[in-house]
Image: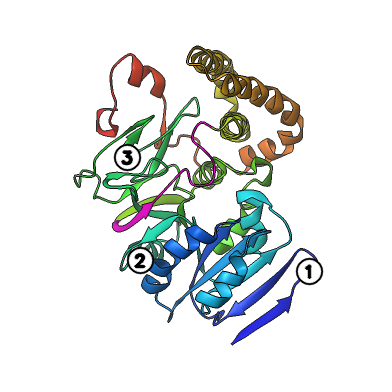
Amino acid sequence: MTHTIETNNNYQLSIVNCQLKKRVAVVILNWNGRELMEKFLPSVVAYTPGEWADVIVADNGSTDDSVEMLKAKFPTVGVILLDKNYGFAEGYNQALKQIGHEYTVLLNSDVEVTPGWLDAPVAAMDADPDIACAQPKIRAERNKDYFEYAGAAGGFMDRYGYPYCRGRVLHVVEKDLGQYDTPADLLWATGACLFVRTAVYKEAGGLDAGFFAHQEEIDMCWRLRSRGYRLVCTPASVIYHVGGATLNVESPRKTFLNFRNNLLMLYKNLPEKDLKHVMRTRFWLDYIAAAKFLLSGHLPNARAVYEARKAFYELKPSYEPVRRENLAKTKLADIPELRKGSLIAAFYLQGKKKFTEL
């Protein structure tokens, strides 16, 4: 049976077999993704225990027939209807306003899960209330022996804002040989499959809606880590992620969002003692990146770097109160998972291309 509840002018919540006493909500944000959901939802439904977890799709104002397909083919899946495309960040923020479960899993629509995929992350979070977020081990759906770029076996970052993972350093992705099968503390857990305490997500303000998409999960995780929470990878849980399914890898739009959002994230979260030095260094690193795009014939991407820096400085004044709040709530001044040196220097000058070499 399907029940539709009017919530406000922005969305409706269609609740199908969803019970508030269940502990886990697996929330998939969808925008015109019928084909992806038809391919990947069957594994999510099959391997998500209905006794204690709900599967819910938050539809970001799709203009295809995604919702009709869900109702016809996946009648046990709950649906949150948003009135427009809010982007990744605000789309999840809007959806989680309707979620009352203890834990929420932010799951991309292009993810194949495996039997028992919820068990290890939930057990880790149950065992330690200081763990705010967790992620499974993520392999590439298109090349299943290898880690997936966006998350691999858990995320870290250098002081200049360059993210990397156990299993992926810059563009070099490792084969999974079991080398990262031990649980580990992280700076960030991937937004492709992010387990989070729902109450902590809401208390921390959720994902930054101003980011629209890209790196918003890193920003939120850094915020939580600085406030004393732990984030972990539980590699006993394995999923497969397509990645790059929503924006082309060479998309100037993606380049713009990555550079702009990364600068905003640094400004929001860096301690005062590091901010000026990091921003001066990033000026040169960003324009080196733009020159590299230009020399390789990618003029739109080079222009996107320039536009991203311009947009950052236009937005910077509006983020001053956010920065003050983050610094005021900081409990962990020295974060072990935040690399003090330069990842770029280690990679290009020292030839360190694997996590274990750093």
Q: Residue furthest right?
A: 9
| Number of the front mark, 2 or 1 | 1
Q: Quadrant of the N terminus?
A: bottom right
Helix, strand or loop status at disc 3: loop
For residue 166, which numbered disc appears in the image? 3
Q: Is residue 241 magenta?
A: yes
| Number of the front mark, 1 or 3 | 1
Q: Residue furthest bottom?
A: 1
112 or 308: nearer the viewer? 112
87 or 312: nearer the viewer? 87
Residue on which the image places disc 2? 123
Mark 2 burial class by Cα count in 10 Å: few <14, some 14-19, many 20+: few
Amino acid type shown at disc 2: Ala
Residue 243 in sight here: yes
Residue 342 in sight here: no
| Mark 2 or mark 1, earlier in chain | 1
Image: 49 above or below 346: below
Helix, strand or loop status at disc 1: loop
| Mark 3 or mark 2, earlier in chain | 2
Magenta stretch in the rendered image: 236-250
Q: Is residue 158 left or right of residue 93?
A: left
Amino acid type shown at disc 3: Arg
Q: Quadrant of residue 9?
A: bottom right
Percent position (x, y) of residue 132?
A: 48, 56
For residue 8, which numbered disc appears in the image? 1
Q: Quadrant of the C terminus?
A: top left
